[in-house]
Amino acid sequence: MKPVNILVIDDESVICNACHFILSEKGYTVERQLTGKSGLDALKSGQYHIVLLDMMLPDMDGMDILKMIKGENPAVCIIVMTGYSTVSNAVKAMKLGAYDYLAKPFTDDELVSAVEKACLHVV
Amino acid sequence: MDSSDIFKNYFRVFRDIIRMMHTTNSLEEVLNLGVKKTSEALRAKGALVRLLNETTQQLEVRAAWGLDKRYLSKGPVSSDKLLKWGSDGRKIHIITDILNASQVAYRQQAWDQGIRMMLDIPLFINSKVVGLVRIYITELRHFSEDDLDFMITVAEQFACVIERLRLMENQKAQYNHLALRMEKMSSLGRMAAGIAHEINNPLAGILLYSSSLVKKAPPQSPLEEGLRIIMSETQRCKVIIQGLLEFSRDMEPQKVLANINDILDKALTILNNEFFIHHIRVEEDLENNLPQTLLDGNQIEQVLINILLNAAHAIEKDGIISVKTRMDAAKAKISIEIADNGCGINGQEMDKIFDPFFSTKPSGIGLGLAISYGIVRNHRGDIKVESHSGKGSCFTIDLPILPEASGKEGEQGVA
């Protein structure tokens, strides 16, 4: 199996660290970014297969980041995370090209299963 | 004055009172003018209107003319004196022996004011006596049938205006209450949405770590148990917050034509098991020819389930829930009535039952009725409750009948 690189973009360091903690154990390479801008910069320089993206970042709108990533790198699989989950939000994110959707709070199993599904899609 | 002058005079008094009735919404103004004109027409010393205060059961002076301030400052009197009109209809009571009249509260004071005769005219609203007009006269005099007729007619006009203004006041109070409640709900809703979002982030951290660590803990160890509790409590918070978001969200109804009886049947089917377990019998009395109306079936079902569940909880075990649907074609509305013979709601709780986070159930979040209320208001309907502690409650939901064409247009810009 090819190594899978994952980027977590969330302004809550606890969530970044938790995702890192859980996914590293499963053998994924995980990097963390706390702002939208630093996340986009990291995407430009690095090679990522999967992005876990928080929709409520202090510096940028989640939907905008989603559009930008999809515009520059359509192959990246984006899993959207949000604390304000509504069906219409989810539908909107999916329409903009998100692969999956995690409503906070979610368990490690839900996280791992979403990432595993995304892996089948990208690798 | 010959009799035609007297009648002309009476006519003018009527005209003035009726004109006043239509130009002012102040009860005091109308009554004050009324007693003044009546006193003048009867050449009386003065007159006053006492109305029954429902809460204190006392007769309070609401208008007076021509009487000494000291006499008026005596304050309210007991309502007993209204009782005497129970048996002898709407007759005017003529009091000539002031000093020995039981129905006069301040006999000596009245005598000292030079009053020798009083006339009591009852005020009736819906065949219930609500007060009286008392006319004070300084000499003993004979009153003809026409004079008495005049007084009765004036009293009828007073009763009319009292009833109309009370209705208006009631409606105003109800509207203000409603506006306040809506305001409270919407500000709480905004706050709830903010809190929900802020809390979901820390919950995500707790749930991710605990669900991951629980797999690493030795099986059946206290550590594992503790982590499982942390997980399940976090999931519980999640459910509460979902309820909050549901409540705060703009619940714009997705309206389609539906029959309320069908929705009610569906809600009853869902709860069938719940009723069965608790030995609750459901009595249905559904209107046969209920027209279809535009509504959001899922939302209305949620409202009905909320209220039916509350009814079941109020009963606990062995009881009856009766559901009824009715159509009021004249008012273009459909009523759904859900009554139970459970524990009822006490007076203090009654004011709060639609408030978010108010619950009398140990494990309740207190959003069921708040959400229901929001949904019904979004359908431009209303929920009313009647309840007697220990006997049961009855919830009535009124929904407007919206036929397809006009309903959809009406939607625009109202939300």
Image (cartoon, grey):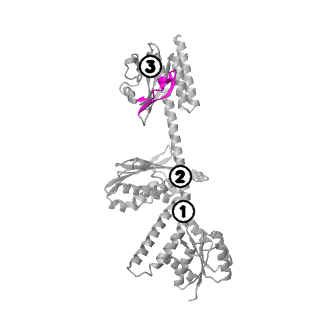
Residue B181, numbered label? none
Q: Dot 2 falls on which chain? A: B
Q: Is residue B24 above or below residue A1?
A: above
Q: Nearer the viewer, residue B12 or B276?
A: B12
Q: Amino acid at mark 1?
A: Ile
Lower position in the chain sequence, tag 1 or tag 3: 3
Residue B263 magenta-drawn? no
Dot 2 crowding, Cα within 10 Å, few <14, some 14–19, many 20+: few
Q: CA distance from mark 2 to mark 3?
A: 52 Å
Residue, disc 1: B195
Which portion, as a residue range, is magenta?
B57-78
Lower position in the chain sequence, tag 2 or tag 3: 3
Q: Circle 1 — which element? A: helix
Q: Is residue B110 above or below residue B312?
A: above
Please check whether the numbered discs 1 and 3 fall on a single chain.
yes
Dot 1 crowding, Cα within 10 Å, few <14, some 14–19, many 20+: some
Residue, disc 2: B184
Q: Dot 3 falls on which chain? A: B
